[in-house]
Amino acid sequence: MPEIKYKVQLSPEEVIMLREITHKGSKNTAKTILHAHILLKTNETTTVINRNNREMAEIFEVSPTTVNEIRKLYSTAGIEAALHRKTRISPPVVSKITGDFEAQVIATALSPAPKGRANWTLRLLAEHCIEKK
């Protein structure tokens, strides 16, 4: 059996917290509950049988990489990082609309509609923005 690189050794307080997540679970996402289960089952301080990542992956029907990443996150960054996803700092695609442009479009939409129209439509706003560049 290959040696496990990242060890999970939960404190009693962490075990209690993870058990609350797995038993109550109503305010947590399914992924958080799954990660809590994996951490509890890979805990080396309480489990008698130490299973490798492949065996744990088969039990929870996830990939061995997932189990390894959860162990790695717990070992390096702590329990919160292992339970919850890291939030993105920047969006995957940079927005083409700047704050100034958005402010101009909103100001135009709130201004009186062109002659012969009761309200601004999206098409009219788009045509107006193309005219004004």
Image (cartoon, rainbow, N blue to C red):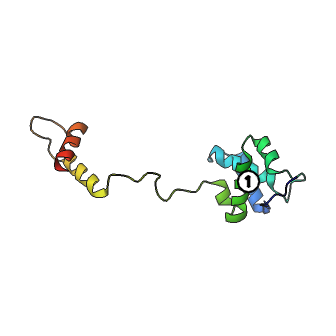
Q: Nearer the viewer, residue 122 or 96?
A: 96
Which residue is drawn at the image coordinates 75% and 53% (left, top)?
A: 39
Q: How many marks?
A: 1
Residue that sits furthest to the left in the current view? 115
Residue 19 visible in image:
no
Residue 33 in the image, given as x and y percentages of width and height: 68, 47
Q: Secondary structure at mark 1?
A: helix
Q: Does 127 appear above or below 81?
A: above
Which residue is drawn at the image coordinates 73% and 50% (left, top)?
A: 67
Q: Nearer the viewer, residue 103 or 13?
A: 103
Which residue is drawn at the image coordinates 32% and 52% (left, top)?
A: 97
Residue that sits furthest to the right in the current view? 48
Amino acid type of disc 1? Answer: Asn
Which residue is drawn at the image coordinates 46% and 54% (left, top)?
A: 91
Residue 6 in the image, given as x and y percentages of width and height: 77, 60
Residue 75 in the image, given as x and y percentages of width and height: 73, 63
Q: Nearer the viewer, residue 102 or 93?
A: 93
Label 1 sits on residue: 68
Left or right, 33 with reference to 111: right
How many C-alpha atoms fall within 10 Å of the one at disc 1: few (<14), some, or many (≥20)?
many
Residue 65 in the image, given as x and y percentages of width and height: 71, 50
Q: Does 40 appear above or below 114?
A: below
Residue that sits furthest to the front in the current view? 2
Q: Quadrant of residue 122?
A: top left
Residue 50 visible in image:
yes
